[in-house]
Image (tube, rainbow, N blue to C red):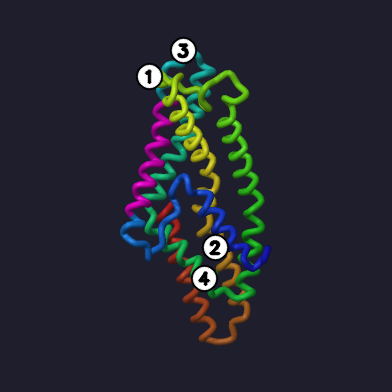
Amino acid sequence: MDRRKLPELAIAYVKIGTTLLCTWPLTSGATNLQRKFNQVKWLSLLLLLCSLEFSILYTAYLSRANFMELTRFICFAASSGHAIIKMIVCRWHQQEYRELIEEMEIFLTYATCREREVLDVCVRKAAPVHLTFNIIGLVAGISYICGPIILDQNLPTETVYPFATDHYPALQIIYLMQSISVLQCCTVGPLDGQVCMPFWFNIARLKLLASDMRKISGVDDLNACIKVHQDILRSQNLFYFSR
């Protein structure tokens, strides 16, 4: 792998990883058709996740007499609820995220070798922790999805519905819906990466700025550093607003 493309690879990984949550914003040049399709896709995925949340809460209510079962389903509900909240928050601030991501992509397009070296170090420091967390979450999700194959249960989450689910095609449809929803919960990890990327990006820019400030030899150099610092502050303020 070309190390010079490591930052682009990190962005591509996060973009693909958040597909099932539809939190990655479209580019500013997207057509109206693309925007409408993206909106429908996001709403469909949100409703799919909400359907799992409601079924889990319903099952938790039915299991309220059993403390262990109640606790188990509350934990399931917290996991899916966490993903729902993040989907809504990212959609609400999609314009801010679009500006931040486009700023990063433009910076990478014109980045010098020195700037890429700093970005590469930041990616290599953050990637192992996030990849480990994401892999563990994905393995756990796949284990739940494959649970009915080896366990005495029909659905991945053992939730109860107010209608019969043990016949075709209801069982197959609900199994598919729950499988997608479980994977959505797993992709919260890449979504955290999407949220943190602007923060890491600004850390890299501050490191570059600190290096440049040590080499200031005149007023023009000082003004250039001040301008870069103001740009970083503007980007960071936008990042804090979008969180």
Instruction: Report the disc number at residue 184.
Output: none
Q: What residue sits 62% from the left and 61% below the top?
A: 122
| 3D distance between C-alphas at marks 3 and 1 | 21 Å
* Of pointers 1 and 2, the one earlier in the residue sequence: 1
Q: Which residues are magenta?
A: 36-56
* Of pointers 4 and 1, the one earlier in the residue sequence: 4
* Of pointers 4 and 2, the one earlier in the residue sequence: 4
Quadrant where the N terminus is found in the figure:
bottom right
| 3D distance between C-alphas at marks 3 and 2 | 50 Å
* Of pointers 3 and 4, the one earlier in the residue sequence: 3
Which residue type carries mark 2? Phe
Residue ID for mark 2? 201
Residue ID for mark 3? 65
Residue ID for mark 4? 107
Q: What residue sits 46% from the left and 67% below the top?
A: 103
Closer to the eye: label 3 or 1: 1
